[in-house]
Image (cartoon, rainbow, N blue to C red):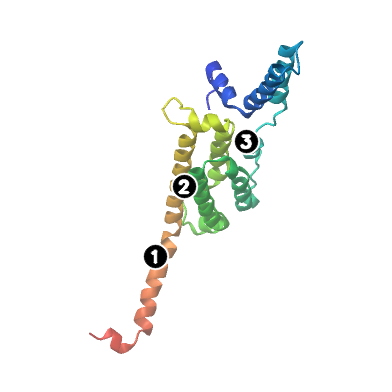
């Protein structure tokens, strides 16, 4: 992710919760001034209130959660669930739907990944995609979005004319589609064997008159 320019950083700050909190307290200070409750040093007081609001507002804990989540090889499925639950409330509704789809596919693949690898029914490339989605692709995508102030992400157009929220949704849908394709490929062989076995049982145990034209 490229480092934002000075105008971009300024735009991010304008939409940030810190700036909004500072402005609210500063306006309260102006209200005290116009109400006659403060007179001398009113400008210093207003500036101080703005600083107190801007500096005292907590940072984005959701972004830190997504960025610093450690995903061990032994607990991938559990960590995926924790990651999704920790960031879902900070995402647009459509993005949450796509994220839950990714989670559902991973919950199907991860417990069986070793078995699928041993049986040779999942390619090394697809196995790598599953692991890297959990370890890197998904956390990186989420943390990049969650670093942005919510108002900026939903309202400010980026270089391609889309908002950060729209871009996030597209990226999550790409991950969702890729994982669904991996799952289809991995389980296709077992599905075909089930169909073949059903035909065998039908031919062996079906009533004789049912087989006669």
Q: Where is residue 165 in the image (x, y as percent from the top left)?
A: 49, 35
Using the image, determine if residue 36 lies above or below residue 191. Answer: above
Question: What residue appears at the point 37 percent right and 77 percent down from the top-left corner?
Answer: 200
- Mark 3 residue crowding within 10 angstroms, few (<14) / some (14–19) / many (20+): many
The residue nearer to you, when weighing 132 against 103, is 103
The image quarter containing residue 115 is bottom right
Q: Where is residue 49 in the image (x, y as percent from the top left)?
A: 72, 21
Residue of label 2: 176
Q: In which quarter of the image is the C terminus?
A: bottom left
Q: For the residues marked 2 and 1, what is the alpha-carbon distance in whole angstroms?
A: 24 Å
Residue of label 1: 192
Q: Position of residue 33 (x, y in %)?
A: 71, 17
In this rendering, the label closer to the viewer, 2 or 3: 3
The residue nearer to you, when weighing 115 against 38, is 38
Residue of label 3: 63
Q: How many marks?
A: 3
């Amino acid at each position: 992710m490229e480092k934002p320019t000075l105008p971009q950083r300024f735009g991010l700050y304008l939409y940030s919760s810190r700036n909004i909190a500072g402005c609210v307290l500063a306006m309260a200070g102006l209200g005290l001034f116009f109400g006659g409750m403060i007179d001398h040093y009113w400008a210093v007081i207003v500036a101080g209130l703005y600083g107190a609001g801007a500096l005292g507002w907590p940072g984005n804990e959701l972004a830190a959660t997504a960025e610093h989540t450690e995903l061990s090889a032994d607990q991938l499925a559990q960590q995926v669930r924790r990651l999704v639950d920790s960031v879902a409330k900070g995402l647009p509704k459509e993005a949450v739907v796509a994220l839950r789809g990714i989670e559902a596919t991973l919950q199907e693949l991860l417990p069986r990944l070793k078995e699928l690898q041993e049986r040779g029914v999942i390619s090394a490339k697809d196995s790598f995609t599953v692991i890297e989605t959990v370890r890197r692709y998904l956390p990186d995508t989420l943390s990049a979005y969650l670093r942005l102030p919510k108002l900026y992400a939903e309202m400010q157009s980026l270089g391609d004319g889309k908002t950060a929220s729209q871009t996030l949704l597209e990226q999550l849908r790409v991950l969702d589609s890729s994982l669904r394709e991996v799952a289809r490929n991995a389980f296709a062989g077992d599905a075909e064997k089930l169909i073949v076995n059903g035909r065998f049982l039908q031919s062996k145990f079906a009533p004789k008159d049912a087989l006669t034209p």
